[in-house]
Amino acid sequence: MELLFGIHCHQPVDNFHNVVDEAINKAYKPFFKVISGYKDFKFSVHYSGWLLEYIKYKDEELFEMMKKSADNGQIEFFTSGYYEPVLASIPSDYRKKQIEKLNRFIKENFGQTPTGVWLTERVWSDNIVPDLVEMGIEYVVVDDYHFLSSGFKKENLYGFYNTEVDGYKIKLFPIDKTLRYIIPFKPIDDVINYLSSIKENKAGIIFDDGEKFGIWPNTYWWVYENRWLEDFINAVLSSKNIKTSLFKEYSDNHKPEGIAYLPITSYQEMGEWSCFADDYIEILSLKEIIGEERFEKYVKGNIWKNFFVKYPESNRLHKRMLEVAKYSKNEEAIMKAQCNDVYWHGIFGGLYLPNLRDNAYRYIIQADKENTETKIEDINFDGYEEIKINNEKIITIFDTKGGQLTELSLKDVEFNFQNTLTRRKEGYHQLFFIKKEEKETKGISTIHEIDLSQDIEKLKDLLIYDWYDKNSFIDHIVDNSINLNSFYRCSFKEYSDFTKETFEIKDFSNNKFALYRKGNIYIGDSILPAYIEKNIVVEDSSIKADINFDIKADLLYLVEFNFHFANLQDITIQGREDIFFEDFSKEFKIYDSYTKKEIIFSFDKDMKIFVYPINTITQSEKGIDTINQGLSIGFICNIQNLSLNLKII
């Protein structure tokens, strides 16, 4: 049998340099140091373009090892989008631009013209096929799950298949999930025995994360200090039944297993992660009931693009990227904004990592910087119009759904202060309270086997879910029982339907407009008509708002703002450093030393003020993380006409 061995290495564009350096020193470089010493062990590699560029200028030793392996024919380079986008999620012209950019880098530095494509997160949608073929791509690696969920049998997945779209033909190589889970986690004998069980003239196919060779928990010790990689290579090379080949060699020298048409899908775990929280647990339960084999064949999770439905913040980013891609000439910034990591969340932080969102918005602001258009348009494709005012200094977007501010980007510092994230339920939160059954195992655990169970009482206090998105200019009608704790825990009583329902637009002109809603107040069994109107003026880097009411109820008005900062330790609030407190004032100031900007609220009356940090609880490859996503501020007064000015200087 032939072993088609590939590794995929990627870091999000402009990731923290210490994180990238750790990946180089613990995984990428030691991997090449070992494997380049065995010239007869052929393998394939895909490195995202930004990472290759980083290595070229930051680690000459590793880059030279890669060039040497390419020169002696040991490795085959796979291409993809330069900045690692999910290819099916970006426009056709940018698919080609991204691939062409990485192809050019590989050709100039390694002398190869790639004919295979690494499919980012293995997100398959056949609409990408014509573009791939036009770019000279002959074959794609997907997962065996793609085939299994289409009715193919596991025993028929040790080779490649042809598929076509509109007559554009391409080859599909299915990655073996068994190999994904045993390399490099199980003892060498287990891996060799499995490979030896594959029939003659067939292929064992693996193409998986290079980070599992040194970065994932316990892998550096296991792979290098315990010599797993070296022993594995020696075992393969000494086996009479196994030989290593490049995908190009196998593709040229073998016939396809047949023809296949695959559904829109990714690997099995991705389908589970993209499900809504309650569905995630049901899917895991169903897997236990019907067994892995039947589950893979008959039960589908969700598609990758459901992350845009699951997380409005992800959808907002994606649709802003699509918007600027239509008119901006800054193609480099747009391609960087297409980097996939920020748009989803699974075992890794993804969308929950503020630095990834900050980077993505920075590129979008760069692409939108020269534009000064004011418009009404459904930018995020949810059926509700947004008002976008884009002047020389600031980009603001107000959504008619809730009448809220969803973007507040300053052009000079390229930072979106509205880049917050809502505290929402995740399916895996329920796993925190379930102790995993300990099983005897040989080797080490994968990141999919991490025990997430924690102290129940501690987590119960931390897991707080918002019932509305954490935007700004959020309207609440509350009573005098509200306090800082109920505001923080999102447990206060809401009397109106203003918070999540639709506002109408009137008096729209260059930099001003009004948002109004004829809604209701709900008190016991009584329903009272209520009206709110927000007259907004955006000038330079300030937003002025006159808020008028027609509400006949003895209640209070709370207007909520949620702001994101690169680091809460860099801010002072009202001259103080604590971030959980009450205040009472006509003026409220936040100074951010990271952007060197001050946010100043001025009101025409004294306001009671609540302040708390927005923290989320997420899983990661290392366990459970608490991540700050922003700062929540509530301004409270009696229900009477109100004027406020939000200025950033």
Image (cartoon, rainbow, N blue to C red):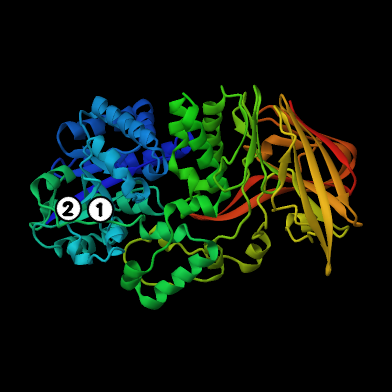
Q: Amino acid at mark 1?
A: Ile
Tell me if 425 is positioned left or right of 117 in this view. right
Give the residue displayed 70% in from the left and 53% down from the top. 501
346 left or right of 175? right
Name the element at disc 2.
strand
Q: Which mark is residue 643?
A: none
Residue 294 screen position, x and y as percent: 32, 73
The quarter holding residue 8 reads: top left
Q: Position of residue 179 (x, y in %)?
A: 26, 58
Which residue is label 1 attached to?
A: 206
Q: Which residue is mark 2?
A: 3
Q: Work out which quarter of the rendered image holds the C terminus and state it.
A: top right
Farthest bottom residue in view: 289
Q: Quadrant of the N terminus?
A: bottom left
First reached walking from the N terminus: tag 2 or tag 1: 2
Residue 373 x, y percent position in the rendering: 61, 26
Report if residue 610 is visible in the image.
no
Q: For this view, does 428 lie left or right of residue 256?
A: right
Q: Residue at x 63, y 51 (%)?
A: 422
CB within 8 Å, label 2 to label 1: yes
523 over 378 or under it: above or below: below
> In the rendered structure, which amino acid carries the disc numbered 2?
Leu
Q: Is residue 102 above or below residue 632?
A: above
Q: Residues within 10 Å of mark 2 (few under 14, many from 20)?
A: many
As drawn, 629 above or below 358: below
Decide which of 25, 281 is in the foreground and name it: 281
Residues packed near mark 1 inside 10 Å, few (<14), some (14 to 19) or many (20 plus): many
In this image, 256 relative to 328: left or right?
left
Identity of the residue drawn at 55% across and 35% down = 361
